[in-house]
Amino acid sequence: MLRVALVGDRVDWHARELTKALAERGVRAMPVRLEDCRIETNQNCGLYIPGFDDELPDGVFIRSMSGGNFEAVTLRLGILHALRDSGVLVCNDARAIERCVDKSMTSFLLARAGIRTPDTWVTESLTAARQIVQRETSRGPIVLKPLFGSQGRNLRLIRTPGALPDASAVAGVYYLQRYLGVEHEGGFRDFRLLVFQGRVIAAMMRHAPHWITNVKQGGRPVAVVPDRAMNELAVRAADAVGADFAGIDILYDADGHPTVLEVNSMPAWSGLQKVTAINIASVVAAGLVGALARHAKRGAQG
C-alpha cells in the first residue's frame, strides 16, 4: 500500500475527507506535523518523518503549515525541500509555498508573467510607504495587507499617508495594493477558483456586504460557472507560482477586466464544497494517485 504524509496542523475536516478519498484508492494517508519532523543525517534517508520509521513516504500533500519564528519556518521548508530532493512527490513543493506565502513574491511573479493583478508596492520604509500613498491615493484608496496572512484578516483601506500604522504593526513591511473593489447591487463580490494539475476543478462567487469577501469574514459562497477567460487566467496564475494545487482569487475591476488578487498554495475548500457538485477531495485524491504512479514510473526509468 502506498503511503502519503498528509501535512497539517491538525486533523481537520479537509484531512479527514482526503484520508477517506485516498483510502478508497488504496493509499494510506498518515497525518504529519512538520514541527515533529527532523533532519537526522546519520539515518539512511537523512530525515525522520513520524510514522514512517526509517523510510520516506511515497508522497506528501501539504494541507497547512503552522507559523513560527524565522528559524522554525526555515527548518520546516528545508524538510520539504529535502523530501523533494530525495525523490518524494511533494504537493505543493516548498518553492511554490514560499512564493505564495510571501504575497510580495506572488505579486511580482504574476506581474512578470503578464497576468493582470493590482499595482503593488512593498517596502520596509514608513517614509517610502507614505510617499507611495501620497502619490497613489489621488486615484483611490490603497489596501494595506499583511505580507504573511490569510482569510482576509488585518486588511485596511488607506486613504491618507497618516493612516499608515507604525512599522511594528505590520511586522516591519508595508505591502500595499491598488484597491479595485467594485460595489454591486447588494454588496461586493469576487471569485475563488480551485486549480489542480493545470485545470480548474471547482469555483464559487463570494458575496458580502463588505469589500472583504472571504468566507471566514462573513462572505457567502454562491455557485458559479466561470467563463473561459477566468479559467485560463486562474490556470496561468497557478503556473506562474509553480503550484499544482492552488486557490486563485479573481475580481472584475471597474473596467470589467478579470484580475488576480491572490494565489493560495494551501487553500481550504469547505465553503467551496457547499456550492460544488463534485467531491473535491475525491478529485484531488484521484489526481494525487495518478501523479504518484507517474512519478514512480519516471523513477524506475532512471
Image (cartoon, helix red, strand yellow):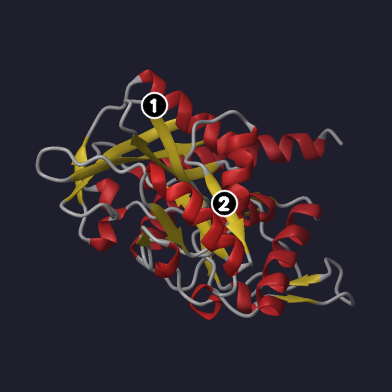
- Name which residue lies at 46% across and 24% down: 232
Comes first in the chain, label 1 or label 2 = 2
Q: Is residue 214 left or right of residue 297?
A: left
Figure disc tally? 2
Amino acid under disc 2:
Trp
Nearer-the-camera pick, 2 or 123: 123
Residue 130 percent location from the top left of the image:
52, 62
Q: Quadrant of residue 257?
A: top left
Structural crowding at the residue carrying mark 1, measured as other residues with C-alpha within 10 Å and reported as few (<14), some (14–19) or many (≥20)? many
Residue 37 position within the rendered picture, expressed as x and y whole percent measured from the top left: 67, 75
What residue is shown with label 2?
121
- The circle on residue 274 is none
Residue 14: percent from the left, percent from the top? 38, 59
In the image, taking residue 20 as reference, residue 4 lies left or right, namely: right
**Separation (CA) of disc 1 from disc 2:** 25 Å
Crowding at mark 2 (Cα within 10 Å: few <14, some 14-19, many 20+):
some
163 or 7, nearer to the observer: 163
Q: What residue is disc 1 on? A: 230
Secondary structure found at label 2: strand
Q: Are marks 1 and 2 in contact (CB under 8 Å)?
A: no
Pinpoint residue 16: horizontal percent, then vertical percent.
Answer: 37, 62
Where does the C terminus fall, quadrant-wise?
top right
